Image: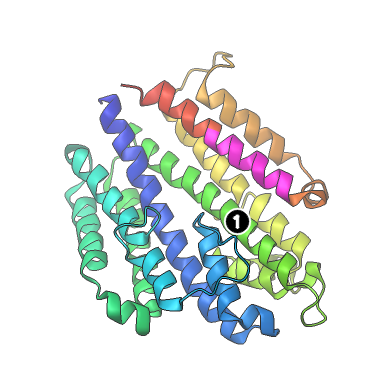
């Protein structure tokens, strides 16, 4: 396999996963705010700022008034906004086109269908009343794509490369969502007599990661800052957790590098090192300085991605 083609497969997986997390964040953050127990969490400006913060375009001016339709269009269907769902899906399809002979017809057709759904979605409808329909369809279509990847591809190096992209992006997006909701919880605390550790934003965070029901089943109590962060960061059995994603990346990188020889310059060594660090961490250590942890894990994921590209995709 050409390194260039391997790189396309890797980024195809990343863009598919990224589009799903942005869509789910828009959906959950917008509609959960309607039932929020305090006025601040229900405030449209608070919700819109949270959405822009999550996609990496925070609004610095506190006095600036945001227009709901413009913000939704920008994140959803704006071809000129690099982080929009439309651009992520477009990039996924372009990368799939470049690796057409290595993926199945079923997977390619599903990606094509996904692209045309997003491309042809009426922006006017989306901004006025189509947010739920659009984001739910995006989330469901990305689930179908992951099913096609698992169910129609040989579980060889092609599959491993796509899954590495998916899991690195999943860990990155979960951390971005944690960072955003942590920021929201700090801003909203005390607005309804609630403390930071019991903020409504932790429930929203779990729903954004599709982990609310399983977290309640695991802890059998209302989400708090510690239980939520522990579940989404350190629990290896939670499919959306950072720990689970790192485990998946490690398993798949070993398919590309099956050598058991000790070599600290390999991607497998770096992934194993980061994975081991969080495997034996206590959540109390992380909660002491969540911001420092977020910066550290994002830097680690960026380093893993760069190391991976240099070792496997350099052309």
* Residue at image point 68% right, 57% down: 231
At 74% from the left and 74% from the top, the residue drawn is 222
Eyeballing the image, is 33 above or below 293? Answer: below
Name the one closer to the observer, 25 or 137: 25
Answer with left or right where residue 8 lies relative to residue 63: left
From the top left corner, tell me how far across and down residue 230 is, in percent. 72, 55
Based on the picture, tell me whether residue 218 belongs to the magenta stretch.
Answer: no
- Assess disc 1: are there few (<14), some (14-19) or many (≥20) residues with their C-alpha within 10 Å of its C-alpha: some
Q: Main secondary structure of the magenta part?
A: helix
Identify the residue at image location x=80%, y=67%: 197
Please, which colouring scheme is shown?
Answer: rainbow
- Whether residue 210 can be seen here: no
The answer to whether any part of residue 59 appears in the image is: yes
Q: Where does the image place residue 20, in percent across and percent down from the top left?
A: 41, 60
298 on left or right of 89: right
* 64 is higher (above) or lower (below) than 113: below
Magenta segment: 291-302
Q: Is residue 113 above or below residue 37?
A: above
User: Is residue 299 magenta-colored?
Assistant: yes
Foreground pick, 190 / 60: 60
Residue highlighted by disc 1:
238
Q: Quadrant of the C terminus?
A: top left
> Where does the image place residue 3, in percent across and percent down from the top left?
30, 25
């Amino acid at each position: 396999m050409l390194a260039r083609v391997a790189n396309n497969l890797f980024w195809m997986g990343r863009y598919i996963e990224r589009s799903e997390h942005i869509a789910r964040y828009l959906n959950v953050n917008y509609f959960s705010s309607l039932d929020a127990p305090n006025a601040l969490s229900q405030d449209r400006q608070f919700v819109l700022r949270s959405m822009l913060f999550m996609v990496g375009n925070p609004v610095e001016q506190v006095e600036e008034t945001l227009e709901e339709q413009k913000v939704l269009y920008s994140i959803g269907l704006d071809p000129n906004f690099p982080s929009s769902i439309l651009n992520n899906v477009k990039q996924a399809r372009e990368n799939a086109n470049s690796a057409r002979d290595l993926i199945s017809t079923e997977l390619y057709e599903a990606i094509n269908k996904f692209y045309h759904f997003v491309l042809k979605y009426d922006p006017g409808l989306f901004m006025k009343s189509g947010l739920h329909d659009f984001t739910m369809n995006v989330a469901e279509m990305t689930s179908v794509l992951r099913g096609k990847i698992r169910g129609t591809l040989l579980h060889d190096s092609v599959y491993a490369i796509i899954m590495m992209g998916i899991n690195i992006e999943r860990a990155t997006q979960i951390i971005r969502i944690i960072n955003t909701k942590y920021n929201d919880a700090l801003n909203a605390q005390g607005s309804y007599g609630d403390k930071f550790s019991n903020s409504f934003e932790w429930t929203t965070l779990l729903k954004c990661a599709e982990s609310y029901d399983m977290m309640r089943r695991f802890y059998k109590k209302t989400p708090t800052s510690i239980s939520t962060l522990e579940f989404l960061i350190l629990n290896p059995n939670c499919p959306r957790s950072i720990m689970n994603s790192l485990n998946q990346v490690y398993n798949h990188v070993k398919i590309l590098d099956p050598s058991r020889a000790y070599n600290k310059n390999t991607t497998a060594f770096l992934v194993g090192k980061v994975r081991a660090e969080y495997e034996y961490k206590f959540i109390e250590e992380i909660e002491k300085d969540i911001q420092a942890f977020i910066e550290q894990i994002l830097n680690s994921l960026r380093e893993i991605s760069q190391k991976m590209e240099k070792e496997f995709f350099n052309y």
